[in-house]
Image (cartoon, grey):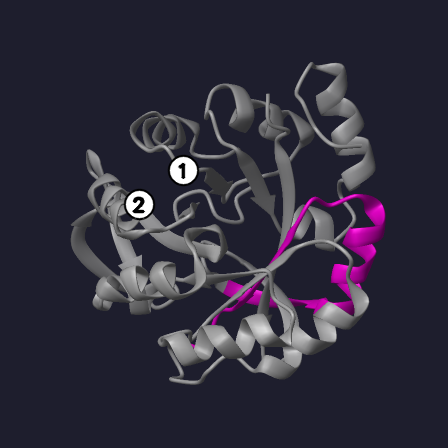
Amino acid sequence: MLAKRIIPCLDIKDGRTVKGVNFVNLRDAGDPVELGARYSQEGADELVFLDITATHEKRKTLSELARRIARHLNIPFTIGGGIRTTEDVEIMLAAGADKISVNSAAFKRPDLIDELAKNFGSQCIVVAIDAKKVKDDWYVHLNGGRIATEKKLLNWAREAEQRGAGEILFTSMNHDGTKAGFANEINAVLSSNLSIPIIASGGAGEMSHFYDAFTEGKADAALAASIFHFGEIGIGELKAYLRKREIAVRI
């Protein structure tokens, strides 16, 4: 059995780590490189760095951030935000990133996923999807959740996989920052319908939520932000808890 991954996520705005609730009311959580180095030492399996304003403000993710991160980390990391072209990806990978994340740009031009998978391999292409449950179904939202679309989450996730995505990073906008638990029902649907790994994001508040994400939600990895940033849960103690409950994790 493959080990389940614990992934701290660092949302970046103006060079600082920030965290909000339901994608709004952001507050400062510290220097992303310092936090990343700490998580690496504590036993995180991977890290995700997302420039949450890059697409909205029409800026490209700065490769300098990737270089700074790579100098201080010894675990894989994904970087995303404003990546729109193969050239952008070349720059990020050359700067030290192991994977890149694409979201709005891939949705607006799905061929981008095909191009990136062909040029760099599916293993380093993460398609991030932000979605919100509206009435009885989940719909994709773009630009940091600011723009609603009529595309259903499962349909887009399937298309992303077919085009060459190596992983799906799904964030439930309904659960983000609430600390009430992950969207396990829809995560299980995604996992059952796709053959690539699903990273669950949005809603972590206590250690049992991670257990539920891996069992009920059938996620391959669980991503969280504020509970790690503000010291509410330590990665070491979380992994010890999961191992006691017979979840395969790397210690």
Asked if residue 66 lies left or right of residue 185, the reply is right
Q: Quadrant of residue 249?
A: top right
Residue tagged 2: 161
- Residue at the spot 38% in from the left edge and 26% down from the top edge: 188
Q: Is residue 221 above or below residue 165?
A: above
Coordinates of residue 210 in the picture (x, y in percent): 61, 30
Coordinates of residue 96 in the picture (x, y in percent): 65, 70
Coordinates of residue 78 in the picture (x, y in percent): 57, 60
Q: Quadrant of residue 157?
A: top left
Q: Amino acid at mark 2?
A: Glu
Which residues lie in the magenta part? 25-54
Q: Is residue 27 magenta?
A: yes
- Residue at the spot 21% in from the left edge and 37% down from the top edge: 137
Q: Is residue 179 magenta?
A: no
The kind of secondary structure element at disc 2 is helix
Q: Quadrant of residue 152?
A: top left
Residue placed most toward the observer, 186 or 166: 166
- Residue at the spot 64% in from the left edge and 29% down from the top edge: 3
The quarter of the picture where the C terminus appears is top right
Residue tagged 1: 196
Marks 2 & 1, CB-CB < 8 Å contact:
yes
Asked if residue 240 lies left or right of residue 119, the reply is right
